[in-house]
Image (cartoon, rainbow, N blue to C red):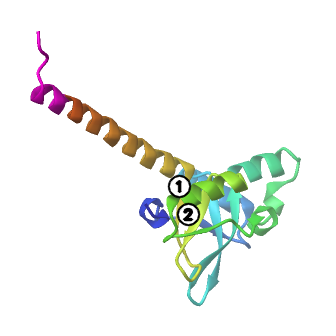
Amino acid sequence: MRAGELCTRIVVFAERDMELAEAARLMREHHVGTLVVVEDAPKGRVPVGMLTDRDIAVGILAGGVDPRSLRVGEVMTEKPVTIRESDDVLDALRMMRSRGVRRLPVTDEGGVLVGILSLDDLLEAVAEQLAELARAIAVERAHEARARPARR
């Protein structure tokens, strides 16, 4: 299965010069904990960073910094780990694990943002596949029982 098949295609994003308070309002309004920070390029929006609610809460508020004085570009994690939509989801999982992230911006072959893939997306897909395996086993057992009734 490919990353592009599982990713969420509607991505809430921010730009470097956006006020941090506005970014936080976007997170609340869209019920997300992460914004992909993008730059406009001739080919489309290219991911250049990630901003999480944790960055704001732990990195800024807990540090006693006034968030009203900051822009997204001052707080974001630069050079986000990305994955291409044509890459296998197992590669995405390995990348998440090795880099310690829960979300990956998904790009096309030209590096343009097309979606976001979360650990939750991967977990949901695996759960569906496990449920299908369990149903296949149940059907096989029922078929076996009909084909070979128990002898007394």
Question: Could you say whether the residue bearing mark 2 is in a helix, strand or loop?
Answer: loop
- Label 2 or label 1, whichever lies nearer to me, is 2
- Residue 43 part of the magenta-drawn span: no
Task: Relative to 64, say whether 105 is above or below.
Answer: below
Residue linked to disc 2: 12
- Amino acid type at image mark 1: His
**The furthest residue to the top:** 152
Residue 130 position, x and y percent, is: 39, 40
Residue 34 position, x and y percent, is: 63, 56
Question: Could you say whether the residue bearing mark 1 is in a helix, strand or loop?
Answer: helix
Residue drawn 44% across the image and 46% down it: 126
Task: Relative to 112, say whether 68 is above or below.
Answer: above
Residue 43 position, x and y percent, is: 56, 87
Residue drawn 46% across the image and 66% down it: 4
Q: Nearer the viewer, residue 104 or 90?
A: 90
**The furthest residue to the right:** 64
Q: Specify whether 149 is left or right of 120.
A: left
Residue drawn 49% across the image and 63% down it: 3
User: Which image quarter: residue 92?
Assistant: bottom right
Does the residue at mark 2 contact the one at mark 1 (Cβ under 8 Å)? Answer: yes
User: Which image quarter: residue 112?
Assistant: bottom right
User: Which image quarter: residue 52?
Assistant: bottom right
Disc 2: CA contacts within 10 A as few (<14), some (14-19) or many (>=20): some
Tell me the distance, in whole angstroms, between the alpha carbons under discs 2 and 1: 7 Å
Q: Is residue 99 visible?
A: yes
Q: Which residues are magenta?
A: 142-152
Q: Specify whether 47 is left or right of 60.
A: left
- Amino acid type at image mark 2: Val
Residue 30 has which mark? 1
Q: Which numbered disc, 2 or 1, marks the residue that appears first in the sequence?
A: 2
